[in-house]
């Protein structure tokens, strides 16, 4: 195991001081290699030292302007600061350079979601779910973006795929209930809301939706 792998292992073990020491040695031994700066930046990002992390990512880009993972790191910094427009720029740059990983597509899509540009998010969230088809969160956010863009017909099978991955995903049941309600299928909607509440009894949205259906049924019968 080389020194870089050792440092990454120390990070996974939450031995951050040891990881930092190893990354520092890597940079001293290879000061013109951007990888050491990127990895040290990722460590600093992980321990919420944003200011120093940014300096390391910027140094990596000074050494190699096509260091895609440095742009990804800068995007992550901006995302954490809720500067979604700037994060969007960095993630897009990382992809343009050639970074083809689920995380970067997902986070780029989410920058559009936070800016309420739901349709613009769709291709990136779709790509994230294609690259990582077993990730229920990527799939769920793609389905949610479809629903928020009024593509409810297309959203339905996506939420069903979420439940195939994670049968305890209460929000997927809730959104299937909303789609059924949108199609005036009250009994199916009620079933989905019940499932959501079985999994998560404090699911406020599902409880409210179920109450509205019950009140409407009682009103019709009175």
Image (cartoon, helix red, strand yellow):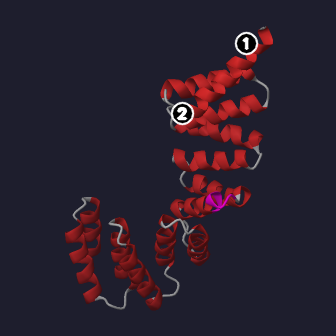
Q: Which mark is residue 218?
A: 1
How many C-alpha atoms fall within 10 Å of the one at disc 2: few (<14), some, or many (≥20)? many
Q: Quadrant of residue 26?
A: bottom left
For the C terminus, give its image quadrant: top right
Q: What residue would you read off at disc 2?
A: 170
Q: Which residues are magenta?
A: 112-116
Residue 32 at x, y = what percent? 36, 91
How many C-alpha atoms fall within 10 Å of the one at disc 1: few (<14), some, or many (≥20)? few
In the image, farthest residue toward the top: 222
Q: Quadrant of residue 53?
A: bottom left
Q: Quadrant of residue 189?
A: top right
For the N terminus, give its image quadrant: bottom left
Mark 1 and mark 2 lie on one chain; the one further toward the N terminus is: 2
Kindly report the distance in space between the C-alpha atoms of the residues bearing marks 1 and 2: 26 Å
Judge whether residue 187 can be spotted in this image.
Answer: no
- Left or right of 192 in this view: 183: right
Residue 16 at x, y = what percent? 24, 67
Residue 119 at x, y = what percent? 73, 57
- Left or right of 36 in this view: 120: right
Q: Nearer the viewer, residue 98 or 43?
A: 43
Q: Nearer the viewer, residue 144 or 1?
A: 144
Element under disc 1: helix
């Amino acid at each position: 195991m080389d020194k870089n792998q050792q440092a990454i292992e120390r990070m996974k073990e939450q031995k951050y001081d040891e990881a930092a020491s190893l990354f520092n040695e890597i940079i001293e031994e290879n000061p013109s290699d951007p990888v050491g700066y990127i990895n040290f930046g990722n460590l600093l990002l992980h321990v919420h030292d944003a200011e120093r992390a940014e300096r390391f990512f910027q140094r990596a880009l000074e050494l190699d302007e096509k260091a895609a993972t440095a742009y990804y790191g800068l995007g992550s910094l901006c995302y954490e600061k809720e500067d979604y427009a700037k994060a969007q720029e960095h993630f897009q740059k990382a992809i343009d350079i050639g970074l083809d990983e689920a995380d970067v597509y997902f986070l780029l899509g989410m920058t559009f979601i936070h800016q309420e540009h739901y349709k613009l998010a769709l291709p990136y969230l779709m790509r994230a779910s294609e690259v990582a088809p077993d990730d229920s969160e990527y799939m769920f956010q793609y389905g949610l973006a479809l629903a928020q863009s009024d593509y409810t017909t297309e959203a339905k099978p996506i939420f069903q795929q979420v439940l195939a991955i994670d049968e305890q995903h209460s929000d997927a049941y809730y959104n299937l209930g909303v789609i059924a309600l949108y199609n005036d299928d009250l009994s199916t909607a009620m079933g989905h809301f019940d499932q959501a509440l079985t999994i998560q009894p404090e699911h406020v949205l599902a409880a409210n939706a179920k109450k509205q259906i019950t009140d409407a049924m009682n009103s019709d019968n009175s």
